[in-house]
Image (cartoon, helix red, strand yellow):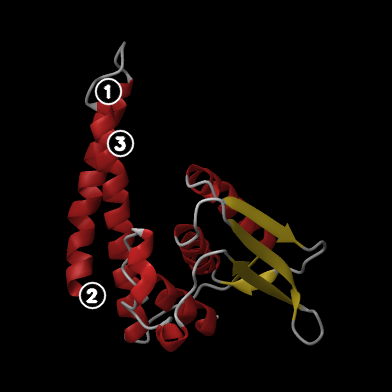
Amino acid sequence: SIISHQLGTPLSIFRMTLGVVEKACAEEARPHPISEYLKTLTDTTDTMIGLVQSLIEVGRIEAGRLALKKEVFRLDDLTRNMAEDFGKYAGANNITLAVDVSPALPDVAADRERIKMAVQNLMDNAIRYSPAGGIVRVAVRRGGKDNSRVRWSVMDDGAGIPPAEQKYVFQKFFRAGNASNYNTHGSGIGLYIAKAVVEAS
């Protein structure tokens, strides 16, 4: 947790500096040859900042300091926005992202940003571990005994997690043995955070 906080400040300064250089290159009369390298650096820095923020979140969860800000929002709208953000990523990997939202869903009361983080982790995993030509199906429907709740789910065409390893899915730093078949990189903390957020909510 301490190391994560220490990393956060220099990474933020690095990211802001990159932004200034990017802006200066964009203002030139013709594209600067360094621009494509700047984009790679910016994307990589954003990934690192996201990882550090996730590690800080893990520290809060383990210390029992996951403070949630309760607010009322629409989970269907949040999901549509996230699907729009993930659309290009899915398309680039030849994966169809289908979103099925039931009409007249009730609002939900939770920490919007943290629920967004959980939804993002689940959608990212589904796309990341789906084969080319696969379909990722996200559904937002009424749930609960009296249909007064909202049920969010995601399905994909990936190989899944071996049955013997499924009990470890939500443990931090766990990655299934067959994850290497997809040539993806992951920290193994996304689902751990998603579970903690949902349970705390």
Task: Find the distance from the CA under tag 3 to the CA under tag 2.
Answer: 29 Å
In this view, the residue farthest toward the top is 29
Local crowd at mark 1 within 10 Å, few (<14), some, or many (≥20)?
Answer: some
Give the labeled residue for mark 1: 25
Q: Position of residue 86 (x, y in %)?
A: 52, 50
Element class at badge 3: helix
**Where is 140 relative to 62, above or below?**
above
Local crowd at mark 2 within 10 Å, few (<14), some, or many (≥20)?
Answer: some
Task: Find the distance from the CA under tag 2 to the CA under tag 1.
Answer: 36 Å
Q: Given the image, on which type of amino acid does mark 1 rest?
A: Cys
**Where is 66 relative to 80, above or below?**
below
Local crowd at mark 3 within 10 Å, few (<14), some, or many (≥20)?
Answer: some
Q: Given the image, on which type of amino acid does mark 2 rest?
A: Ser
- Quarter where residue 193 is shown: bottom left
Element class at badge 1: helix
Specify whether residue 189 is in view: no
Give the labeled residue for mark 2: 1
Task: Find the distance from the CA under tag 3 to the CA under tag 1.
Answer: 11 Å
**Where is 94 relative to 140, above or below?**
above
**Position of the N terminus by quadrant:** bottom left
Report whether 55 appears left or right of 141. Answer: left
**Mark 3 vs 1: CB contact within 8 A:** no
**Mark 3 vs 2: CB contact within 8 A:** no
